[in-house]
Amino acid sequence: MERRQLGQTDLMVSKVCLGTMTFGEQNTELEAHSQLDYALERGINFIDTAEMYPVMASADTQGATERYIGSWLKKTGRRADIVLATKVAGPNKMMPWIRGANHNLDATNIRAAVEDSLRRLHTDYIDLYQIHWPSRNLPIFGANRFDPEGERPAVPIVETLEALDEMVRAGTIRHIGVSNESTWGVCQYIKQSELRGLPRIATVQNLYNLTARHVETSLMDEACYREGVSLLAYSPLAFGQLTAKYLDNPNAVGRLTVFPKNWSPRYVRPAVLAATAEYAALARAHGMTPAQMALAWCYSRWFVGSTIIGATNLAQLKENIDAADLVLSADVMKGIDEIHARYMNVGQ
């Protein structure tokens, strides 16, 4: 499988990354191990997780995903074969089980989060450590408009960078990244790292799929190009919507039906369903499944360092990985852009 450089680091990762947020909720430990084994067999060397996983988040399951990866690493001894990424949770009073209701992105919290992740993962270093979401006010997770009325006290970016620098110097993390960030935020992280000699972010992990191409219109792609930051695209199938399985069967088993009250509204807006139907028709007209087309498109984007895929069974995982070998024709790409022009960023 093709490998790509992450940012300006020495990390070379597969263009497909195994996302793991189902481990511990929709997948058992045995199933998680099977997915990890299969992913490596297929050439994937990049594994992404987070301290708050699995999703949907709860006090009973928090940390289970990292523990399952850790037990696999302990069993197989394959730590040197993977690039391991995890994340520290930003502030969220609805998750008091993560270091208390007032957890944030200060030095004390970051140090504790890193230590806990290392213990669960059975490793002594993390290749890529990411800020899961910012401390400051920012429209994310389905909110798509900045609201100054939402301003709140926040840990300054420079303070977070200084805390991460401490972990880099200690050797517990190698490189850093951000997630659910804005173009302004990415540029601020770069600016502060250059001004103060602090670690430079290598990646930004943001939502990117056929119904959510805000990365392009917000000039995030330009910022990534000019600053040497790799985009890690998450939710390339829009929580399963772009497989068209819910259009074919509204009661299909998946996150949107297993957790009907706990997902972002961005995945079920009427315009998203309309766009999905058109993308599905385009894919099928060209002999592909909707999932194959959606993933092949994302894999092919020039500014995507790696695309994070998730699956609840090996059949899904195989289809997702197989799509990495597809090359979309000019007619398909033209059709995709025509649909996007009608339903621009409806799933953002």
Image (cartoon, rainbow, N blue to C red):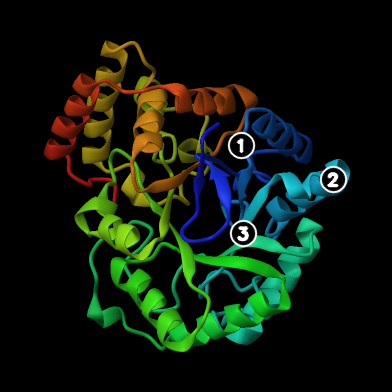
Residue at the image point whose x is 76% and y is 53% from the top: 67
Kindly identify which residue carries mark 2: 77
Regarding mark 1 in the picture, which secondary structure is present there? loop
> What amino acid is labelled 3 in the image?
Thr
Q: Earlier in the sequence, mark 3 or mark 1?
A: 1
Horizontal and vertical percent position of residue 300: 36, 35
Q: Given contact means CB atoms under 8 Å apart, are the residues at marks 3 and 1 in contact?
A: no
Kindly identify which residue carries mark 1: 44
> What amino acid is labelled 1 in the image?
Ile
| Front position in the image: 246 or 153 | 153
Query: Where is 262 relative to 109, above or below?
Result: above
Horizontal and vertical percent position of residue 274: 22, 32
Kindly identify which residue carries mark 3: 86
| Front position in the image: 4 or 306 | 4
Query: Where is 137 relative to 302, above or below?
Result: below
Query: Where is 318 relative to 93, above or below?
Result: above
